[in-house]
Image (cartoon, grey):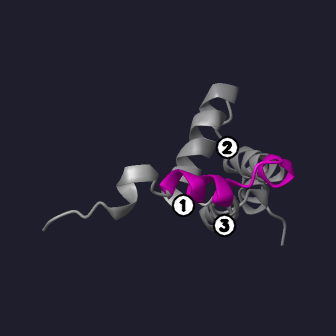
Amino acid sequence: MMLTSAAAVLMASPSPQVYSAACGRLASVLGISLASARRRVDIQAARNGIRDTSGKVALAQKLLDEAESSDQDNHTKLTSLLEAVGSDEHFMVED
């Protein structure tokens, strides 16, 4: 049974689940939500003129590689930003 060229192209393109998984891995490495990671990829894709899912998956992988190779540990940076400083360490919020 021969597939038409349109059907072959549809079968070759990654599914939205693959895109979500790529964004999930990026979110995990950066310590952000899936929605934030997806938004980051979508904004970068729009800047680069990428509209297809396979291009977005490749872009998410590129951003993941960059995040993994960066010298900054995002989790450590976030933790240091959340620590109380000086007089704020005994501050209590009332209900």
Mark 3 or mark 2, earlier in chain: 3
Query: From what the image shows, is residue 43 above or below residue 79?
Result: above
Eye-nearest disc, 1 or 2: 1
Q: Which residue is mark 2?
A: 52
Mark 3 or mark 1, earlier in chain: 3
Q: Which residue is mark 3?
A: 21
Mark 1 or mark 2, earlier in chain: 1
Secondary structure under tag 1 reads helix
Q: Quadrant of the N terminus?
A: bottom right
**Tag 2: Cα neighbours inside 10 Å, few (<14), some, or many (≥20)?**
few
Q: CA distance from mark 3 to mark 1?
A: 9 Å
Q: Residue at x 49, y 56 (%)?
A: 82
Q: Which residue is mark 1?
A: 34
Q: Residue at x 37, y 52 (%)?
A: 87
**Tag 1: Cα neighbours inside 10 Å, few (<14), some, or many (≥20)?**
some
Q: CA distance from mark 3 to mark 2?
A: 16 Å
> Which image quarter: residue 29?
bottom right
The amino acid pointed to by label 3 is Ala
Q: Point out residue 57 in the picture as x, y percentages from the top left corner.
A: 73, 52
CB under 8 Å between callouts 1 and 2? no
Eye-nearest disc, 3 or 1: 1
Q: CA distance from mark 1 to mark 2?
A: 19 Å
Q: Point out residue 16 in the picture as x, y percentages from the top left corner.
A: 61, 61
81 in magenta: yes
